[in-house]
Every structure is written in C-alpha cells, then in structure tokens.
Amino acid sequence: MLIKNASLIITQNKRREILRNKDILIEDNIIAKIGRGLKGDDVLDAKNKLVMPGMINLHTHLPLILLRGLSDNKSLFDWANKLFPFEKKFTKEDIFLGTLLSCIEMIKSGTTCSVSEYYFSDVIAKAIKSSGIRGFVSETISDRFSISGKINDALKIAESLLKEYKDDDLIKPFVMFHSLDTCNLETIYRTKELAERYSVLLGTHFMETYKQIKAIKIKYGYSPIEVLEKKGILNENSLGDHIGWLTDKDLNLIRRRNVKLVHCPVSNAKLMNDGFQTVSNVLNKKILLGLGTDSPASNNSLDLFEEMKSCILMERIRMIGSNTIFRGPINAQNLLNMVTINAAKILKLNTGSIELGKKADLVLLDMKSSQLHPLIDVISNIVYSCNSSCVSDVICNGKIIMKEREILTFDEEKVINKIEKKKYF
Amino acid sequence: MLIKNASLIITQNKRREILRNKDILIEDNIIAKIGRGLKGDDVLDAKNKLVMPGMINLHTHLPLILLRGLSDNKSLFDWANKLFPFEKKFTKEDIFLGTLLSCIEMIKSGTTCSVSEYYFSDVIAKAIKSSGIRGFVSETISDRFSISGKINDALKIAESLLKEYKDDDLIKPFVMFHSLDTCNLETIYRTKELAERYSVLLGTHFMETYKQIKAIKIKYGYSPIEVLEKKGILNENSLGDHIGWLTDKDLNLIRRRNVKLVHCPVSNAKLMNDGFQTVSNVLNKKILLGLGTDSPASNNSLDLFEEMKSCILMERIRMIGSNTIFRGPINAQNLLNMVTINAAKILKLNTGSIELGKKADLVLLDMKSSQLHPLIDVISNIVYSCNSSCVSDVICNGKIIMKEREILTFDEEKVINKIEKKKYF
C-alpha cells in the first residue's frame, strides 16, 4: 500500500520528527519507504491528512462495555458488586459482541492495539482478531473473582490461549493475576511460572484503593509492591496497572526491577480510587509509563485522546497549591509518547512510531477538522484539542481497517443492533 | 420544519421525560407540536437519531482560538502575558475568522449558544450571526487589559452593541467588567449602570487565582465577593465566572443575591488556577450553575461533552479522601442540566429544553454511534461516553445549521484555509 502525499507525518521517531508532504510505502505489513514521489499499488490519498502512529490502550476489560451506564456513581467495590450478577450471566455470544462494540469505539478513536483482561479470553481473542486490530489478551486469574471459581480452569484457558496464538501477528496472549488482594501467593507463583514458560508479560492490578493497601499491610506487613518484590514476582516483564497510591519507596523498587506501569486517570477518578502519586514523579524516575482507559463500564469510554488530556488536567488538579507543576516533565509530547512509542516499548511491539522497518499501525486525522487549527503546535493540537471526530482512517498491520470513518472489517451496525436486542440489564 | 420519527427525544422538561419515536413540528423558530404522525413541510428524517436541546457554553473568549497551542504549560498570568503581544496585532479580519473557527467547533460539538467576552465585540457579533447560532457578546471592559487603553472607548463599543442588537433573535449583547482585580470601582459602577440601563446581564470574572484574592483582601479588607456585595454590585442579573476559590461565606452571599455562577473546569485545571470549592457544594446551596469552556487558547477546546465529563472527574479528584462524594448531587443528569435548561435559565433564554413554545435549538446525535450503546442509561451515555463525533445535525432558532456534519451556513474549509495562510505566530 502507498499512502500518498500526507500533509503531515508525526513520526514519533527518536528525534520526534514531523514530516511534510511525504509518502509512506507499506510492503506487506512493514513501513518500507518514507519519501517523496514513491511508487506503489493500492494508493491511499493522504492529501489534507495527518498520519500518526496508531495508539495503544494499555489496560482495559473490553466486554464490560455491555454494562456501561449501569453503575455510575459508586466507588470501586460498590461499582463491581453492582456489575457482578450481570457479568455472571454473560454468554460467549455476549462476550463476542461486547468486544466488537469496544473495537468499534477503539478504531474510531485511533486505537490500533489494546491490552485487555477478562473471562472468556478465547472469545475475546477471536473478536479482536476479526476486527483487524491488535490485542494483548489475558484470562482473569483470581481466587476471588473467578467466574467458574476454579483457578485450574482459568490457568488452563490461559495456557491454551498462549499455545493457540503463539505466532499470531495480531493477537498476543499474556498472563495476568488479578491482584495481590484477590490472589493468594500460590496462585501468583503459578501465574508467574506460566508467564515465564511462554516468555510473555505478567500483568497485575497494583492496588486501586487505599483500603486495599491497608489490608495488605495488615496481612503481610508491607506495601503491595514491597510484598511482590520480596516474593520475587517483579521483573522487567511485569506490567503494573494503577499508580495512584504508589509511594516513592514503591517507585524506587519498580525502577530497580524495570517494571512497567500503566495509569488509568479517567477510571480512577470516576471510581474515586485515585491517590496522590503524580505522573511527573513517575516520569522523573525514568519508569516506562503508558495510559489505559480501564473498563468501559467505569470510564465510560475507550478514547485515548480523552485519556491523554484528562491525565494532565487531573495531575494539575492534584497539585493545587504546589509550585512544582510547571517544572514537571508532563506535557503534550510526553502524553503522546505514553500512548504510542512508550506503550510499544512496554509491550515489546515493533510499532508506536513511523519509521522504516516498523509494522504499519497508522491513524489518519482529517486536516479539515477545526481542532487541528491553527497549526501553531500540532502535538498540542492532537493531545489537547483533537478527539475521535478527527480520525478519518485507520491502518493496522498494513491493512486498512477504517476508511473515511467506515469500518471495513465487520458490520458495526449489525453489532449494535444485536446488542440492543439482547437487553442485558 | 418537521423532525420526523426521532428515536429518542431528551426533553429536559420539568419531569425530564425521554420520548420515543415521536415527531417535533417547528413553526418559524418555535416548537409547536410534539407527537406521532404530525404533518409538515421540510421534513428532517430523525430515524436512528436522538434529539436533545442545543448546549450552551456560558463562558469563553472565542477569537482566542487563533492562539491555541501557543502557551500550553503556563499558569494563568504567564499564559496571558505570552498571548498579549499577539493579541495586540489582531485585525478585524482576524477576529472575524477566529470567531468563525470557534463556531465550527461549537456547532460540531452540539453547542448552539455561547457567552463570549473579548475586544472587537462588534466583529464577533457579526461572525456569530453569520454562523446561525446564538451569541451573548460583550466588549472587554478593563482598566488594565484594554486594547485601546481607554475605558470610554470600550464603554462606547459596548453601548453601540446594546443598541444595534437590541431586538436581535440570535445576538444578545451584555456587559462585563473584566474583574475586581483589573477594574477600579468607578469603572465597575459605570459598567453596572450600562447593564441596568439596557436591562442586560452584568458578567465578571470572579477571582481565578488565590494570589488575586489575597491582593484584593490587602487592598479592600474583604474577599472579592464581599467587596462586590458591599458595593452593591451583586444582584440577580450578575453572572460570575470561575468558582474555584469561593468560600462558603461567599456562596451564601451569592445565594442571597441570587447571583448566577459559571464553572470552567478544564481551563481552570489546565491553567492551574482551580481551587477547593466543590460543584456539589454549589449545587447543594441551590445556586444556578452552568459550565463554560473558557478560552480555546487555554482549554484548548470548545467542547461541552468534554466539559461535562471533566467537571465530575475533577470534582472527584478534588475530593480524594473525603467520604462525602457519592452523597453529593453531581451526576450525569445534573451535568446535562448545567449545559441546557439551567444555562438557559441563567441567560433568561427561552431554550434549553424541548417543550411546546420553546425556541427550537436542537442537536441530533447519530444513534449508530457506538458511544450511545448499550442503552442502559441514555443520560449517562450522553454525558460520560458521547463526544462531538456523535453529533450529526444542529438546528438553531428553527433553522438547520449543520446537516450530517456539514455546516450549511458558511464555508468551513475556506475559514480554515484563510487562517492557515495568515500565520499569526
């Protein structure tokens, strides 16, 4: 495919170059050439378009979109308790449809890869694959929240997923234990063993509420991060979600073990479980940090434009009265890094920037969108002014997934109609 | 005009009714009938559309969109100082184009009325009028920030605007003194006299930063609200922007004088000038409160969907550690009220709800948007999940302004091209 005459290319390469009026030649799924006057088949006219790397949502639970709006004004545990009876009734078809509804929302807001944990991960993998975008998928491993109630069953599903998608280009299975709060140490060790055996990421929810942290301290005598560190769980393949309550001591351990972090500002705020740790502090410690929307039932969106802007707004609210804020490293460029190149580094994906040899996961924004003007600072416009309405086309793994806002890989209207007929609530 | 077979109508009437599969007949600019099987000309097919009241942005400075992205990581005064040399160079044509660029963004995000203060208010009024939406427009009155430097000139412009648009259906001139910080008392009295003589709103920026409040306390011995109250400035026609640093004592004065308030959560957070006062507390005191984006150079958007969601997220961040949050009155319905019916009440506009006799300011959302599904709680979906990409059509004062995302009243591409050619920076 040849992307012809792109008005702007936000490369996100090391020099963060922005190119003007250039072509991108994609051979198979790889960016083969960037330049002027390139020749190739399957021309996509990108005049009046901006091309940027596809965005990566590092933490979500996709099928829960089926319950968004059901439980809005509650704190984390009351929210989850309200959802649970409905979740228990989900069929495989529900999971498939819910995942596809989430895919519509991700594609339309420029997301080409998500990291999702939930039950029925085999069904989720199939749905994401059929949508044409990338998905890191894990089965929920938890002593407390398991649907079938049996850890062995969950581990079996996790392992069969690891086998089935071992060499898949789009679906990357990984392993996740739900949290130190909901898993005993034996479960965590078994999960870790599985991750190591298949050389995949080991994810977990670092604590979401202060109450959880206090409970862990009473049970183990240490903070959750300290416990995980002492038990040998943390290493460079660890991915920890939710940063709100991490102490500076925790961050130092995280840095030492080269653990990667995911911040979910919107969901944390909406569920009232955010803490006092700042993004600026995490970035200052040179810890790799990305963004996630968390569940679309708590967020209630899957929109990384919104997540980037919310991230900095909430950081500033959190720092009212402090004089440090404008010296902190959080700005539009850093926010864009979090959802592109840094997220790709966390996942060890060969995407996240527009460079030769990278896989072609690209998003085109319509330069006719008012949000991109005036063009004083295009990165500022992308992060602080654009939203999903600016996204015109999406390419994933070298294939066009959405053209002029029409999804090509599946019938979005059919998915929505089927969901509305089912009435889950 | 006949809006035929709307899938959902969010009336925002007293009972907050939501109607299904009904028609809306508009005669001239008024909602004349709501029912099934209505007859009429100029049929707009609203099958698979949701109809809601057009939204009202209660505080902004529209032409400043020309400088968005120029001054992102600064606190209020540094931000303003960076803009000022560029603002001084603005020509009338710049102001006209900038206002139209802002109109594009407002129309596409479902806003049919804005309240804007800036210089060249005569030009702003003309631009808004040509876009077809409503505008409350005021000339900046300030001893410190005046462009010409002369209060008499500014008051003359303000008065000529009051005369010219006295009976206009779309443009409503009002009067605003910039703030107690930037105007001496004589200027404030003259501004108030003008507002009273023409029976219009008297707006002002209540203090934006804590530093300003301290300066006022040193100068006058009281908080800004107390000073304005003691000097007889506050009454039911007063509109105060920015609520962050208001004390409970201030709120009680505001309540007693029936003053109306405007909260600008995104801009306050981004400029790091938000305080500790909560929206829940303001609502609990039964003070009429609406939302504004503030300047598109600080926000950097003009999107009330974003403003509603950000409002509640920041409220919750602000209340970390408090147990009161989920008992507070802030929720999706209240947020929608702030940008529709309550905003209309503040402006004494006969809009903000879909009821017989109201002026037809309506926004249609495309029910094919994933953000509106599942339909568990449509108000939640509008406030927490939808964004401007869901807006398909906009009607203002009984006329179609945008149809299937194409603005009909002016050439948006031409506006953007002209602005990009000028290069203001």
Image (cartoon, coloured by chain):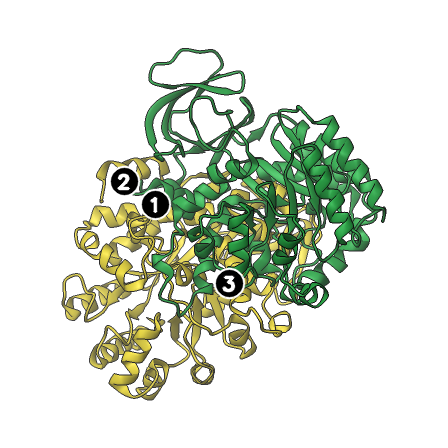
Chain colours: A yellow, B green
Residue A179 makes an appearance in the image: yes
Q: Amino acid at mark 3?
A: Met
Classify residue A128 as left or right of residue B102: left
Circle 3 — which element?
Answer: helix
Q: Residue at x 33, y 88 (%)?
A: A230
Q: Amino acid at mark 1?
A: Leu
In which chain is the residue bearing label 3? Answer: A
The kind of residue on which mark 2 rests is: Ile
Is residue A334 toward the left or the right of residue A273 in the image?
right
- Quickly name the residue at label 2: A419
For image coordinates 43% across by 28% down, the residue present is: B354
Q: Are the residues under badges 3 and 2 in a single subunit?
A: yes
- Tell me which corner region of the image, top left, top right, bottom left or bottom right, holds residue A183: bottom left
Mark before the other along the chain sequence, 1 or 2 = 1
Q: Answer whether labels 1 and 3 touch (C-beta < 8 Å).
A: no
Q: Would residue A142 appear left or right of A300 to someone viewing this image?
A: left
Label 1, on which residue? A101
| Mark 3 neighbour density, 10 Å: few (under 14) some (14–19) many (20 or more) | many
Question: Is residue A230 placed above or below A91 in the rendered structure?
Answer: below
Q: Residue A173: x, y in percent?
A: 32, 64
Label pair 1/2, CB-CB below 8 angstroms: yes
Q: Nearer the viewer, residue A233 or B147?
A: B147
Residue A16 vertical position relative to residue A95 in the rendered view, above or below = below
User: In this figure, which residue is indicated by the disc labeled 3?
Assistant: A314
